[in-house]
Amino acid sequence: MLEQLKDLHAQALDELNKVNSLRELELWRVRHLGKKSSLTKILRSLAALPLEERRNGGAKANEIKRALESSLEEKKKLLQEALLTSPLESQTLDVTLPGRPLPTGRLHPTTQALKEICDVFKNMGFQVIEGPDVEWDYYNFEALNIPQHHPARDMFATLWIDAGIGGKARLLRTHTSPMQIRLMERERPPIRAIVPGRAYRYEATDATHESMFYQVEGLAVDKNITLADLKGTLFDFCRCLFGEERKVRFRCDYFPFVEPGVEVAIGCSACGGAGCRLCGYSGWIEILGAGMVHPDVLARVNIDPEIYSGFAFGLGVERIPMLRYGIDDIRLFYSNDLRFLRQF
Amino acid sequence: MRIPLKWIRDYVDIKFAPEELAEKLTMSGLEVKGIQTIGGTWDKVVIGEVIALNPHPNADRLKLATVDLGTEQVNTVCGAPNIELGQRVTFAHVGARLIDPHTEETVLLKPAKIRGVASEGMVCSEKELGISDIHEGILVLPPEAPIGAPLSAYLADVIFDLDVTPNRPDCLSVIGVAREIAALTGEPLRLPQIHYEELENLIESFASVDIAEPDLCFRYCASLITGIKIALSPSWLQQRLNSCGMRPINNVVDVTNYVMLEYGQPLHAFDYNKLKGRQIIVRRAGNGETITSLDGTKRALNPDILVIADKEEAVAVAGIMGGLDSEVTDKTDTILLESANFNQAAIRRGCSHLQLQSEASIRFDKGLNSELPLLPLKRATQLLLELAGGRAAKGIIDVYPGKSRPKPILLSAQEVKRLSGLEVNVDGILKILKALGFECQEGGPGSLLVSVPYWRSDVKCAADLVEEVVHIIGYEKIPITRLGSPLPQQESKLSPSAQQSNLKEKLRNILTGFGFQEILTYSLISLEKLQKLSPKLELTIPPLKVANPMTREQEYLRTSLRAGLLSTLSHNQKFEQPGIRLFEIGKVFLPPHPPVIASEAKQSQEEKELPQEKEMLCAVLSGPREELSWQADKEPLDFFDAKGVVENLLNQLGLRVSFDIGDDEILFPGREANIIIEDDKVGIVGDVHPRVAQAFELSSAICLMEIDLETVLAKITGIKKYRPIPRFPGVTRDIALVIDEQVSYRKVENIIQSFPLVTEVTLFDLYRGEQIPEGKKSFAIRTIYQSPSHTLTDEEVDQTQEQMLARLHQELGATLRD
């Protein structure tokens, strides 16, 4: 009987080696460990044998049963592992096929720049306010120290709605600065606001001039606001937008509604300050005009210029993506060619 | 303004390299746009004398010139018509760097044989030397030019091209710029000494001046010189005018221009003998009056234009241009020299009427100080006596109705600090202001009483003086601080605008997430495009017109965003972009309307006349639903895509939206809907009318949606309320209903929704065809039943569904599909 058990064991192991699937393994289990298997039959027949033989045979038969069971477990693990790691040929993908396309939409580069600019100032406590595109001469010019026949009117080629003259004439605002007046008429200091919006000029368009463009106006009025605060605010802004390393220049300039007046320029990105066509060989690119709100402007809106002071600035928005992406023609912005817009 | 540094050096020493000086000026507000170096490449160009001139053996137009260079004599071939024996000329040796007059590039001069005769170098024109564009002849130097000397030592200069801001007409002059440089660099300023002999005859015995318009002409000064000899100016004077970009004409005209460039005060010389009645009258031009100006153009005048007239007629357009009839000519013997001050607005009006500008008008229209005219007049008289001979009549005519005594301005060190953040003591302020020519007196502790000098018209208040101080110290010295003041209250009257900004940002983010590309189109549009938005080509809203449009394409303010979107779509379809989804959020301009809300009524009277500016959202979609791909849904985008966008968009804002049948003329009747929130129409959605699509040259079906953001904003309460997640599971039931074609889905859904246990209704199939009778359709609807209080039993659901089916049958004639 011991011989028979030994043969059984050998045969079972031999068959197990040939098993290649879980289904075959199950058949093997039924054949060798199932109720009708030879091993089970032998175990059942033991009862009829004499004690000595029964003890020896029983011990051996159980030993073989445990060995087969453990072999079964091992084989099962192997097969399961193989099943996970080697999927069938038919499940293999051509992973080089393109993924399913999703419709993609993007914000206009001007909107992206506006958001970036507004976010910086919002974090400094500025409110975002908008104002009308169609303005009175009064707000666009007169209240900003640019009366009729002032030479500074030459700086603003104007698209008029009313051909007539005087403060009652309507026009397309040439800058966002009229909102300085509207803000100060309605609010009392402290005021801290920015005004994003469109501005218009009667100007032949070319690569650097558009008849419509976006500006962001800024205004802060309170006691003890100084040119140094303006410098700090704008330096912070430039660093946020152009990086810590970028050089910023703050120089004297003239705008009728501020005094002292300032022009802010950043180091030219194209030439690194050495001078090139982009920066007009100066190494600097003007990005905004600013200054301390003119005392006459404050007085006009009944804010006492001897108690209060403030600063204002106006920033050209398209300038920023143009510099950043090397866009050399401003007309691309509002012609809305998707081949342009989809690049940003 | 072109400023030669050589000229500047007459008045101030410059101890900086031109680039450094340019940087200082730029930083202080006088922007140097360009630096032109004249003679930087003249290392092989010397001065010589033409000592022999012979005809060229093989060419009629060429000459053989021998030029004495002091140490040697050279032979050269010259084709210039103006070469003459004895001239001092410029000679370029072989190897010199010259400008090729045709290509304008710098080239090296090579040895050459011209028509068989060897040339050892060449005699140069101004253009070849890079001095000016003159190439009609060679540059002839004055007889005192030293033979053999390098040209650079004699003629080289650096010219600054300055961008002078309109507040600083004083810097449209060499002395003005020299004064800035002196203050910036701490060097003393040297001004010309003015002194000349006068005749015994008083000027009043020669001429009289009458200002008829004292509001337009604040001052008129004149001197008179007799026995003058008109000739060419000396070369130094011609050279300086050339450097500044002005053409020399004759000694009299040149002196008036020279002094204008020197002091910034325009002057004009009249031929005294041509002034009828020996009289100058400053008056308005009459209607129908004309004048032929110096440029030979006959110009029609009107009473808006100020003229200088003699007894009979206008002899000059005041401050803009002289008249041809009283012009100084070769025969002129006596001149009356004018130095006046005019109202800047009058000059600007005159310029705009005549469409004419001059070197004089660009100075007058900035507003010159009425104290300025006298000194330049004396300076010009002195120079004329020196350069053109003659004798000056005794005295000066000075009619000065506009004299005012400007009050000194009080400036404290504290004010400088308050505005600039810069700590400067009174002595420091005093030093800077004095260097700029301001007179200062003690003005109390820590303060100065500052008098503005005669050449400055722009300094009127303490803030102006602060800028004077700070720009000389340098903006780079201003400290960098952050705003320290308290933040404004956020509860502001302006917050609706901030809310609208937030809404716009949210909508933009949602729509780009839905695959829409944002565009921004012009506010101005052509009338034609506005008309094309209607199948009948009629305007429903009158658009506002620009009085002076640039082009017909940009003549009217848009009354909707539609045309911009359709045009953009049309433009992009040409490039075969598949499936285009575009949107714009922006303003439209509608006729002003009377105020409706109480708060608006407070706005000023004026406000009502501005157009109503309304923020709108408009979107279009067209083309295949999905981009071309190996498994794409190749169906075109349609009405239900557009509607889905509207629903999802408004749902994300927390709004419940419904739709009813629309009737907007841009859309296709029967394929359009109004977007409704709480019974109010907030927009439209639908297929674009084929006639409109055709008018915009659109090649496929287009869906359009438009939403009025103000109305939407009013519907947003801003407060979202949390609802607990259901604790008990829902039961899902699908039913298929057969129903008449005419019955809209909404009616079915409304009935199903009316059962309280129903939490979700989804239409998942719409079927017409086999097994469904003609005139009927089948809706397959999934309904989810759920209770907040317990797990529903099958019986409860069955009961509800039975009631539901009964109502659907009773009210809509719907039956269950077998």
Image (tube, rainbow, N blue to C red):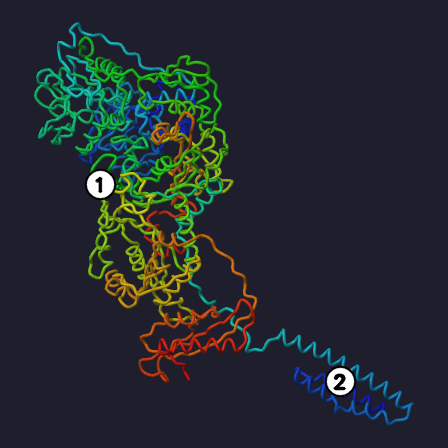
Image quarter of residue B354 = top left
- Identify the amino acid type marked 2: Leu
Q: Position of residue A279 (x, y in %)?
A: 39, 39
Q: Badge 1: few (under 14), some or many (20 or more) residues near its Cα, within 10 Å?
A: some
Q: Position of residue B413 (x, y in %)?
A: 45, 20
Q: Position of residue B382 (x, y in %)?
A: 24, 13
Q: Same chain, marks 2 and 1?
A: yes
The quadrant in which the N terminus of chain B is found is top left
Q: Is residue B551 or residue B637 the one in the foreground? A: B637
Q: Is residue B227 or residue A132 the one in the foreground? A: A132
CA–CA distance in space, label 2 to label 1: 104 Å
- Identify the amino acid type marked 1: Asp
The quadrant in which the C terminus of chain B is found is bottom left
Image quarter of residue B273 = top left
> Closer to the N terminus: mark 2 or mark 1?
2
* Residue A218 in sight here: yes
Q: Is residue B640 or residue A287 the one in the foreground? A: B640
Q: Secondary structure at mark 2?
A: helix
Name the residue that disc number 2 marks: A13
